[in-house]
Image (spheres, rainbow, N blue to C red):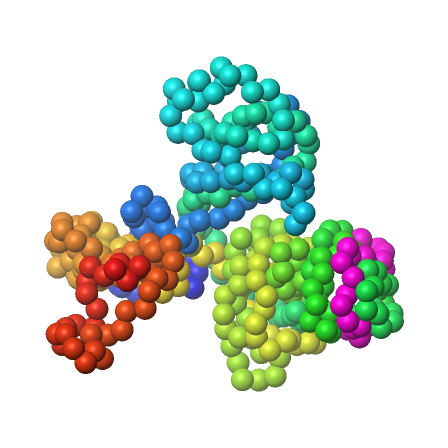
Amino acid sequence: MKTFTTLRNTTAKYCNVSTSDATKMSLIDANINDSIRTMCNLQGGKLRFLEATKDIYTVANQEAYQIPNGFRKLIDMYVYSGSGSSTNTVYAPEMVFDPIRWKNIIQYRLGSQDVPYFTYVEDTRFLMQPIPQTDGNLIRLRGRLQTRDLTIADYTTGTVTTVPYTTTFTAIVAAAAISATLSSNWSLTTGSYQIKFSNNEVRTVTLTNGSDAAAWTTGLTAAATTAITVGTSTGGSLLVSATTVFTADMVGRYIQITLTTAANGGDGFWYKISNYYSATQIGLSKLYEGTAISSGTAAYTIGQCSAIPEAYDIGICYRATALFWQNSGDGVRAKGYWLQYDGGNEAGYSDIYGGLVSQMLANEGETEEGTYVPPFGSQTTGPNAPYYWPFQQGSGF
């Protein structure tokens, strides 16, 4: 993934601009953020990488709820009969888009109950009918993300000591056990964490700061040794730094532990930071898949990145550079970058998408992988056609 620092340095190189030129770099920064918004709004923003979920909870006798500020558009929702456990009933209220139909619905005076029938988006909030009767029932919202400007430079000071985070219980955990005692008091924030036992079973455990108690609801199917791995509530890994450098505003940025062949080195992949626990401890949104780091001093980079997938984020630089040369009056150079960006569609050189954008829309606009279509050249019959038909859909038909 390209961080804001990488994007601006790459674009400055394409524009023959020194990064010390504050005036021109300000223009480049504006072009970068404009390009991110433009790419994220292609095809009306109906792109898989812009979809996200957010959990909120019902309030008794409250009809209207705020749509999360990070959502550009609410797509769908479903409601649990409780706080979200696997035993809850899940309801899928119908989303109403016609204001006249919604007016008719509220005239029925459906009252209050915990089985939602309808929901309606009104400005920056959504309304539910019937009105929820109980506090604390989980509402899971699915929406398309807003884009916000990238402004923060990379952070590269400090080293990673440990990932994932491991600790031990005071005794072997027997089969059917639903509790155990940590070898020392829990030092992180009180909350729910996922523990992986030595027998590879995973349980959600509530751990309390300053306490060594651990309990879970479903007993183990087999005994496990005292060694355990503790992750975030969503199953990502905990990461510990050697120095007190992490801050709460780093949540949402990405961290890359530098790839190296040396012991205790990183895997070179980017991981989104999902939790802040302390100045030395953060949570990743996904499990760390590199070789475990223990008592290490691995270098890392924390950067602000766009939502655009890594395979296409160089397109941000192409478009920002095209705008720079176009505004500078150099149409020849501008055209070259427009062609690399989208085949010249936005600039009026072509009436169809090409370049990097065509690849992004073909790959990221699908909702599923679809049927495999072999290369025509591998067929025993049929024309010796190109590797694929340009109009081929993701479904294979």
Q: Is residue 368 left or right of residue 250?
A: left
Q: Image point 73% across, 74% down: which residue?
A: 198
Residue 349 in view here: yes
Would residue 105 be counted in the magenta stretch? no
Quarter occupied by residue 206: bottom right
Front residue (pair 395, 263): 395
Q: Image point 21% across, 68% down: which residue?
A: 388
Front residue (pair 292, 105): 105
Which residue, as the protein is rendered here, is positioned at the far top? 107
Which residue, as the protein is rendered here, is positioned at the far bottom? 262
Q: Image point 38% across, 19% down: which residue?
A: 100
Residue 317 in view here: no
Q: Image point 67% across, 40% down: which residue?
A: 82
Q: Is residue 364 left or right of residue 221?
A: left
Q: Which residues are magenta?
A: 208-227
Residue 297 location (% of width, % of height)? 64, 75
Residue 273 location (% of width, % of height)? 57, 58
Residue 61 location (% of width, % of height)? 64, 23
Front residue (pair 299, 20): 299
Quarter occupied by residue 386: bottom left
Which residue, as the protein is rendered here, is positioned at the far front? 381
Q: Is residue 167 left or right of residue 120?
A: right
Q: How many marks?
A: 0
Quarter of the image with the C terminus is: bottom left
Residue 248 location (% of width, % of height)? 62, 51
Quarter occupied by residue 394: bottom left
Would residue 217 be counted in the magenta stretch? yes
Q: Is residue 118 left or right of residue 221?
A: left
